[in-house]
Image: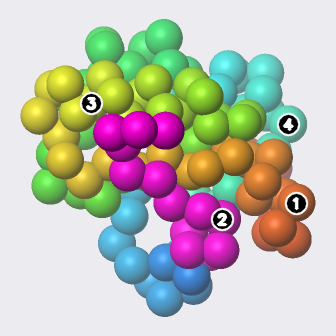
């Protein structure tokens, strides 16, 4: 998408494997979240993001993901409008993550 930072599944996997300090936020619905997450993914349904923006640190490297990348792109746009610069959209969402051979786990 134009105007937002995107990250692909391979790069995200490398960041996780390297222990890069990131915050991984899943903006899918609770029902979708319960079907499996990327390890360390935090649930924050997109509709709740405006209410939880103050809980996020603009200095953090934040990667948003959803099913296909559309809702997480909206999350990136929204936070960029709030002055956040270090936000990334996982291109292709969890669908691409799984297609790339990466694992999903049951949420805790």
Give the image's coloring scheme.
rainbow
Q: Are marks 2 and 1 in contact (CB under 8 Å)?
A: yes
Q: Is residue 58 above or below residue 22?
A: above
Q: Is residue 45 above or below residue 100?
A: above
- Residue on which disc 1 sits: 99
Q: Nearer the viewer, mark 4 or mark 1?
A: 1
The region drawn magenta spans 1-13
How many numbered callouts?
A: 4
The residue lying at 57 percent from left, 25 percent from top is: 71
Is residue 5 one of those drawn in magenta?
Answer: yes
Return the disc, 2 or 1, that comes first in the chain's sequence.
2
- Residue on which disc 2 sits: 9
Look at the numbered disc 1 and give the secondary structure of its residue.
Answer: helix
Return the disc, 4 or 1, that comes first in the chain's sequence.
4
Return the disc, 2 or 3, that comes first in the chain's sequence.
2
Q: Can residue 25 be seen by looking at this rendering?
A: no
Residue 2: which quarter of the image?
Answer: top left
Q: Percent x, y for residue 15?
A: 49, 78
Q: Are marks 2 and 3 in contact (CB under 8 Å)?
A: no
Q: Nearer the viewer, mark 3 or mark 4?
A: 3
Q: Can residue 32 be seen by looking at this rendering?
A: yes
- Residue on which disc 3 sits: 79
> In the image, which disc is placed on residue 77?
none
- Residue on which disc 4 sits: 35
């Amino acid at each position: 998408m134009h105007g937002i930072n995107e990250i692909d599944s391979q790069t995200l996997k490398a960041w996780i494997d390297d222990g890069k300090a990131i915050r991984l936020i899943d903006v899918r619905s609770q029902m979708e979240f319960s079907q499996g997450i990327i390890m360390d993914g935090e649930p924050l349904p997109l509709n709740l993001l405006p209410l939880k923006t103050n809980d996020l640190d603009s200095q953090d490297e934040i990667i948003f993901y959803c099913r296909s990348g559309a809702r997480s792109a909206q999350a990136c746009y929204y936070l960029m409008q709030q002055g956040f610069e270090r936000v990334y959209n996982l291109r292709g969402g969890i669908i691409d993550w799984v297609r790339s051979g990466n694992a999903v786990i049951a949420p805790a």
